[in-house]
Amino acid sequence: MDIILAFLIGLLYAAGIYSMLRRSFIKLVIGLLLLSQATNLLIFTAGGLTRAVAPLVPDGEKIPPALSADPLPQALILTAIVISFGVLAFMLVLLHRSHQTIGSDDLDKMKGTDE
Amino acid sequence: MNALIPFPILLPLFTAIILMLSLRWQTLQKYISLAGSIALLIISILIFAQIESKGIQAVQIGNWPAPFGITIVADLFSAIMIIVTAIMGIAINIYSFSSIDINRQRFGYYPLLNGLLMGVCGAFLTGDVFNLYVWFEVMLMSSFVLMVLGGEKAQMEGGIKYVTINLFSSAIYLSGLGILYGQIGTLNMADLAFKIRTLPDTNVLNIVAMLFMVAFGIKAAVFPMFFWLPASYHTPPAAVSAIFAGLLTKVGVYAMIRSFSLFFVVDVDFTRILILWIAGLSMLSGVLAAATQYEFRRLLSFHIISQIGYMIMGLGLSSKLAIAGSIFHIIHNIFAKTNLFLIAGVVHRLKGTYDLKKLGGFYKNYPILALLFVIPAFSLAGIPPLSGFWAKFILIKAGLELQQYVIVIVALIVSILTLYSMTKIWAELFLKAEPSTGDNKPLLKPELSLLVPVVLLAGLTVIIGIWTEPFFNILMRAAEQLINPAEYIHAVLGVQL
């Protein structure tokens, strides 16, 4: 399972960076989105994939059962998803506004600030 | 348990909430925001005094014991950085009084400014690597909107580059963090430091260290990853670009110093050499690129990169004196660089352009402004007795003590080149006669609210330069806390290293 996910994560990173290198702003946004998904999966995988029960403390005991899954990576991913959702919303507004102002979504035409 | 420590985060948050609710009363907004920043300064000085007397203070949020909950820690380095942040907040608030137009205010300029301060303070105070990511995002979100607020074409173009590269760096940081958690099993900085020092089996740690280095390096705009900064920092209004130039890159440097002194300490020979290379190349590339520029703020933006090189140099040398020099340079640079951006804003206010070729005659027409420019400019170049001289002196002395002659020579050459750039601005802006445009417009007078922060920051530069010794002693203690993390670990976890 780790191996499959590792390849999937690699693929997502590659796809994300490839899209970011395209000239269209929309593809740049999609690339960033893929990149953040790849990162989330990476946290999930690196946190350890174990076949175990949920870390709930049974009635009358003080600690969760010995073989329980680590809930922290999922909490991290949840936070990261929320943040990337907010950022994506901002990117879409920026896309819309910059298209209005610049009149193009070609990133090669946005060199005005580099000279 | 210390109730004061979270206040530098809570205060800007409350100020921002009040400002959001009072969005309609625009004069009131200015004063609320300024009052918030002054309160932040008072709180941060109180925190500083407490750390001075009682040592490093830590707060466990929600009373969850240390490695499990989120910890907020203030050591001397954090406390100093928060004081500086508050001073910047005050200066920028006053400067915004007359320089931010009504439309930007209506769309929430002041709440965003306070959101930015909250993110910066949070990044300086947190003791948890994931929490650091969250504060980075808080800071970035505010800065994204501040960057493009106003919707001018140049702002959009600069904003897209700024947003993209910063999100990319956040993704890299998050990847590193995920791998780090998988390997060590903790996210608390003190716990990381403890576990990494006691468990020598850390093969993947160098990979994580490099991921962190790239992520922080992009945020700090060091050598191969700086191109976004001069493409975007000169586009927003002067007040915004001044606080960006002063504070934001330094948060990256802070994170770098914190992580590479606290927990990436396994393979120091490799990381230190790498950091020194990055430092030297940042210094050189920044200052050389600046020499070709004639746009006032773009020129200064390139100088940020070369100055970041000095701060990283102290981390690369990594002796107590060098770290103290690094912190000295960060503080000096925040004051001096922001001040230069503010002066650029004043010039733009008076003449409507940032192009040095079209400007001139300022020495004749505005002699006081010339004097105010000389202080931060000479300080940046390292002329005694201003603050920049001492910062560079300490770093170079530390370099000589460790016999790293190459980086010392680079630092000295870059210092001279910086002086060249500053004299270029001086010659173009102040000495050269004003190019005649045909029409004789009457001389405008800068508003008082534009000059007050410039005077304030110039005064601080001089004060740090003249009363260096007490200031330096504090920094040496801050560096001591960074070099020997035993006290930090003890304050957070309650265990001895």
Image (tube, rainbow, N blue to C red):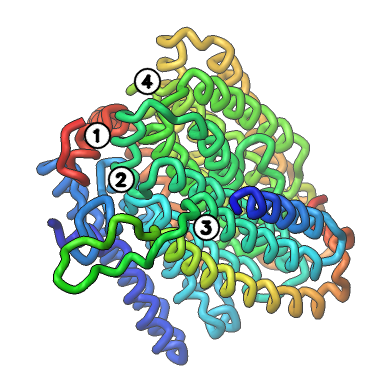
Q: Going by the image, does B40 lie left or right of B345?
A: left
Label 3 marks a residue whose chain is: A
Residue located at (39% from left, 58% from top): A70
Q: Nearer the viewer, mark 3 or mark 2?
A: 3
Verify CB contact (< 8 Å) between mark 2 and mark 1: yes
- Residue A1 drawn above or below residue B147: above
Label 2 marks a residue whose chain is: B
Q: Calculate the distance from the C-alpha at mark 4 to the C-alpha at mark 3.
A: 38 Å
In the rendering, which numbered label is found on residue A44? 3
Q: Quadrant of residue B426?
A: top right
Q: Calculate the distance from the C-alpha at mark 3 to the C-alpha at mark 2.
A: 37 Å
Residue located at (49% from left, 48% from top): B177
| Residue behind mark 4 | B319
| Residue behind mark 2 | B80
Which quadrant holds the N terminus of chain B? Answer: bottom left
Q: How many marks?
A: 4
